[in-house]
Amino acid sequence: MSDEKSIKLQRTQSVLRELIPEALSTLNDDMLNGLCVIDVDCTRGKYDATVYLDKMMFDADEQKYIIKHLKKVNSHIKTHCMQSEGWFRCPDFRFKFDDKLEKQNQMDDLFAQVARELEKGKKDDN
């Protein structure tokens, strides 16, 4: 039974990953209609969904602008999703910028730096 729910939830999340960018592309705001949705995480069944967005080099002010305006167009996005899928209900969206990729890049840089220092140490030993 829980596997069935988890499959339904995963399907909903997958569908929302496609529908939210579609809805954003219909807006007249260049900063919003080009946003990249990285992931959608539904909680409490399908009542809430956290939408993770790619930072795409947005500075802090741009990120604030985007989050503020996404709150304003939340109902438009929900309506688009409901109409596209024939749903009677759509999760409440919370938008966040995902920093996992940024953290991964920092880790990759650290590992590369350590590797260079180890190589340098081997050359110094010879």
Image: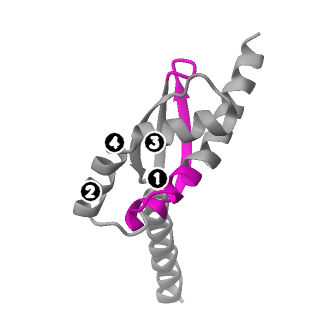
Distance from the alpha carbon under mark 4 to that under mark 1:
14 Å
Residue bearing the label numbered 3: 76
Instruction: Return the x and y of residue 105 as percentages of the image width and height.
Output: 48, 65
Q: Three-letter amino acid code at disc 2?
A: Tyr
Image point (72%, 13%), residue name: 2
Numbered mark located on residue 13 in the image: none
Asked where in the image residue 14 lies, by quadrant, the reply is top right
Instruction: Return the x and y of residue 26 as percentages of the image width and height.
Output: 51, 57
Q: Is residue 5 left or right of residue 65?
A: right
Front disc: 4 or 1: 4
Residue bearing the label numbered 2: 65
Contact between labelled residues 3 and 1, with CB atoms less than 8 Å apart: no
Instruction: Return the x and y of residue 91 as percentages of the image width and height.
Output: 51, 28
Distance from the alpha carbon under mark 2 to that under mark 1:
14 Å
Of callouts 2 and 1, the N-terminal one: 1
SS at circle 4: helix
Residue bearing the label numbered 1: 53
Distance from the alpha carbon under mark 3 to that under mark 4:
10 Å
In the displayed structure, 82 sits above or below 59; it is above
Residue bearing the label numbered 4: 71
Q: How many marks?
A: 4
Contact between labelled residues 1 and 4, with CB atoms less than 8 Å apart: no
